[in-house]
Image (cartoon, coloured by chain):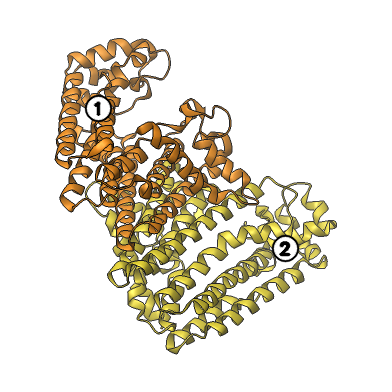
Chain colours: A orange, B yellow
Amino acid sequence: MIKDLLPHIESELQRQIARLDQPRMGQFHDMLTYHMGWTGEGAGPEATGKRIRPLMVLLVSAACGSDWRSALPAAAAVELVHNFSLVHDDIEDNSDKRRGRTTVWKKWGIPQGTNSGDGLFVLSNLAIMDLEKNHPAPIVLKAATILHQACLDLTRGQFLDISYEKRDDLIVEDYWSMISGKTGALLAACCHIGALLGGADEGRQEAYRSFGRHLGLAFQVQDDILGIWGDEALTGKSTASDLLEGKKSLPVLYGLEKNGKFAARWSKGPIQPGEVRELARVLETESARSASQAAARRETDVALASLQEADPQGEAGESLKTLADKLLNRGA
Amino acid sequence: MIKDLLPHIESELQRQIARLDQPRMGQFHDMLTYHMGWTGEGAGPEATGKRIRPLMVLLVSAACGSDWRSALPAAAAVELVHNFSLVHDDIEDNSDKRRGRTTVWKKWGIPQGTNSGDGLFVLSNLAIMDLEKNHPAPIVLKAATILHQACLDLTRGQFLDISYEKRDDLIVEDYWSMISGKTGALLAACCHIGALLGGADEGRQEAYRSFGRHLGLAFQVQDDILGIWGDEALTGKSTASDLLEGKKSLPVLYGLEKNGKFAARWSKGPIQPGEVRELARVLETESARSASQAAARRETDVALASLQEADPQGEAGESLKTLADKLLNRGA
């Protein structure tokens, strides 16, 4: 089912972004289609991302027994929000590359990069209004409010992420506040909106929401584990290791709380490529890996229990479970 | 009446921004209250701006015979949009100062500056949803859609403004496309939303919308005239003259189209303080001032004719006319 949905998601996204395909706006439209992975150098399936968020909206909506087609504008809206946040993230993190391609700000400058992110954000606001064609106005308002609340959480998480860079007193709790906003909020909103549009009652909406939130958190923690102990990270040849980037990920915060050999080395300044393998080993002996794995397992368990409570139906329900399993078992 | 409304606008804005006044979010909240002119160095009435846009929403709504209180969330929303665009504008224009105070990005860096602008934008989205307390859901959706469309026009105008910096083939028509987005769209939306919430029929909504749009355009052209021939601009001592900033304002574009002495000098590179007075004189002899004044007069006439067609009622109607006169007669 996922394979069938993906082309519909792309065409809805293209339709929404085509609002900018107008006289004089050619280059502005180009910036957005480039970022979305459709045009320019390196365009193609590898460049678009996996469209997890719109898939969640559509699958949840269908698993509640509704026609996923009527949720397409919301699916586009959440993906546009996600991409707005990526474009601004890349500016805020000073990142030159995204999915192997030059980032928008690096290609067109910070002014156009900032404005392109704003454009994607505005388009998401307009996309969600399009639900009005197939849903009563109070439902559309509810969906929009859920999305806007998630966006507020995104900016909260982003504020914390940026401010953490300069802080050396962070604890594990700080990590959860940050990723709740950066990763949990939008996935929670995707499932919540899907359930709302699918006609689920409030209890089931909450169960889906909880599923999305904890799926997001579990996924992020796994990503953090792979960022230090994944195959790519351990080669230490590129910037593939989060240790080289100085990223204050969950394992690093566990290590810092331990205040042992890892913390002593970390406090002395940037990690060098030659140290990556040994430092990952030290961090592992100081239990940061097992503690992170336990956290990932805990979040995964909550996500799956919530999904069971939500009780997704039919083919979409099966696809949703498959997608969740795929996202949650990445071999960390 | 305007003096009575202003404190209500401020407290509604504060209420909306207080969504960020939460544990761990103190500094994020501070960034926004600083930008709004309420806290930090130089805070006070001089730092808040004139709140023209929310005043328009409330006055139009009241001049249509409705209680302005029920339009307060929309008034806050348009001002939050305006301020989001200012925060990002300052990044995009590399401006250190706004209303005499250090800009947000200059004070907290580009990453937090970008995210603060995003935060204001999200808060505007949430603010307009608050209309639901006093208005039926379809009206709230209509108001939100009008606002989002204006935001799309804002990003369009901003795209043009940034791309114009590098172009030397601009014509007067390019100017109108740019300021229609940057200045006309949001003021049009303010009056349109005010009329919608005030219960005006579609014809009257359109008349108010046209009033807002042309008021915005007239105001901008007058601002451009003052930017070259205003008292401050002519002293040439600071960067008060648009000529020093290299701004492609309407008089400059008239001058470039003339392709005479002014255009010859302009093409040779940045204008120096010592040349400002003479160059303003050249531009005047080449009819750029009178052509700009004619354009301002034309826009003013359309604005006032639209206002007359809209036929604002009562004390609010009088205040609206007074405000329009004040904005349109700045002695350019």
In the rendered image, residues at marks 2 and 1 fall on the same chain: no
Q: Is residue A332 above or below residue B198?
A: above
- The residue that label 1 is drawn on is A325
* Residue B109 % position (x, y): 43, 43
- The residue that label 2 is drawn on is B251
Number of other residues with Cα within 10 Å of mark 2, as a class: few under 14, some 14 to 19, many 20 or more: many
Mark 2 chain: B
Distance, label 2 to label 1, CA atoms, is: 63 Å
In which quadrant of the rendered image does the C terminus of chain A lie?
Answer: top left
* Residue A282 % position (x, y): 23, 13
Exactly how many numbered labels are in the figure?
A: 2
Q: Is residue B316 left or right of residue B248?
A: left
Seen at 53% across and 82% down, the residue is B310
Mark 1 chain: A
- Residue at the front extreme of this rendering: A314
In depth, the one of B247 and B238 nearer the eye is B247
Residue B79 appears anywhere in the view: yes
Seen at 61% across and 66% down, the residue is B220
Residue B241 appears anywhere in the view: no
* Residue A99 % position (x, y): 45, 27
Q: Is residue B162 left or right of residue B52?
A: right
Residue type marked 1: Asp
Callout 1: SS: helix
Disc assigned to residue B61:
none
Seen at 21% across and 22% down, the residue is A255
In depth, the one of A183 and B293 nearer the eye is A183
In which quadrant of the rendered image does the N terminus of chain A lie?
Answer: top left
Q: Is residue A257 above or below residue B126?
A: above
* Residue A272 % position (x, y): 38, 15
Callout 2: SS: helix
In depth, the one of B330 and B193 nearer the eye is B193
Q: Is residue B61 above or below residue A205?
A: below
